[in-house]
Image (cartoon, grey):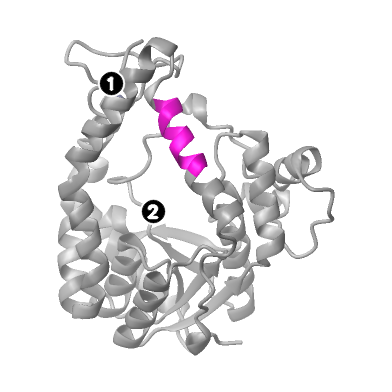
Amino acid sequence: MKVCKRCLMDSSDKDLVIDDFGNCNHCNASIARWNSAEFQDQTNRKVQLNKWITQIKSAGQGKEYDCIIGLSGGVDSTYVAYLVKEIYGLRPLAVHLDNGWNSELAVRNIDKILDRLNIDLVTEVLDWEEFSSLQRAFLRASVIDMELLTDHAIGASLLKISKRFNVPYFISGFNFQSENIMPPTWIYPFKMDSLNIQDIYKKHGEGKRIKSFKFLSFKEFLFFGKNKMTLFPILNFVDYHKETAIEVISREIGRQFFSCWVLVLLLKIRRERIQIKFFCILNLLHPLGITAVELGYFFCNAYLLHFLVIHPNPGKKSLKKHILM
Ligand SMILES: [Zn+2]
């Protein structure tokens, strides 16, 4: 069994090739793209960024909002909110999807961000009974990505809000620095298609009719971010580093918000110890033929199962204060 020393991907991915330095082809492709002119030509990135900002401001003239941003309370989306409002002077409307998994800390953070940056919010609340039933069906099906349900719901919500407020620009927190290294063999291109979700629920669900979960049509899914609503991944056009972003957010948003990032930093400090424990377990299971990826998958599913079965609806506190309904 070959394992990449950088990302821990192993040869359960049939396309994996490890080089003489122990790095895999996925890591090398990602590093090569990061070193390309697309990300390293700072002048061109700045020109592109200014072009986008001018275009969004111009299209938004006379409207209450000129762009939509997603807000989860995490680092990426918080930094996008800060950049968009404080640095580039746009007038964003924030959209938050409450799928029942919000922690109270996340809700407090979102409240703080909205208050500090003076941003309006629309919260889309999913029906917990139905959504958890869909998630249980995905667990039973053992498919590659349970989060696609939330991602699909986010997409449908963004399109709905974009139409409702007549705002065609969505500024996303997607960034090449911390995402985009998924092996192609793990990605089924139509995994987020509504037909796929409905089929999985039909085969592995609890026999109920899906009533409230909003599906994207095939056309909306295929042209998402390219047609009715234009997607702009702003973090790919600025010099984005997570550690610096955490510092800026902590300083600009306020001390209370910092408590969340302390947790992130503590996790970073503890990361090496966690890795050691992970490898100890892995060494024990290795003779049984259990890989790092399978073990990681097991822990993720066990964690989700714990909440779905033992602690239903962990996030009960909603963002009522900022709902524009
Ligand atoms: Zn790798």
With respect to residue 293, does 217 lie above or below? below
C-alpha separation, residue under disc 1 versus residue under disc 2: 25 Å
Given residues 34 and 191, the one toward you in this image is 191
Q: Quadrant of residue 106?
A: bottom left
Q: Quadrant of residue 127?
A: bottom right
The residue positioned 57% from the left and 55% from the top of the image is: 310
Q: Earlier in the sequence, mark 1 or mark 2?
A: 1
Q: Is residue 91 left or right of residue 23?
A: right
The residue positioned 28% from the left and 21% from the top of the image is: 4
Could you tell me what secondary structure mostly forms the magenta stretch? helix
Q: Secondary structure at mark 2?
A: loop
The spot of residue 145 in percent (x, y) is 55, 40
Quarter of the image with the N terminus is top left
According to the image, label 1 marks what residue? 4
For residue 174, the mark is 2
Quarter of the image where ligand 1 sits: top left
The spot of residue 308 in percent (x, y) is 59, 53
Given residues 314 and 65, the one toward you in this image is 314
> Label 2 sits on what residue type?
Phe
> Label 1 sits on what residue type?
Cys
With respect to residue 14, does 153 lie above or below? below
Q: Is residue 251 left or right of residue 200?
A: left
Residue 39 appearing in the image = yes
Mark 1 crowdedness (10 Å alpha carbons): few <14, some 14-19, many ≥20: many
Quarter of the image with the C terminus is bottom right
Residue 217 in the magenta stretch? The answer is no
Label 1, ligand 1: CB separation under 8 Å = yes
Which residues fall within the magenta stretch?
293-302
Given residues 321 and 61, the one toward you in this image is 321
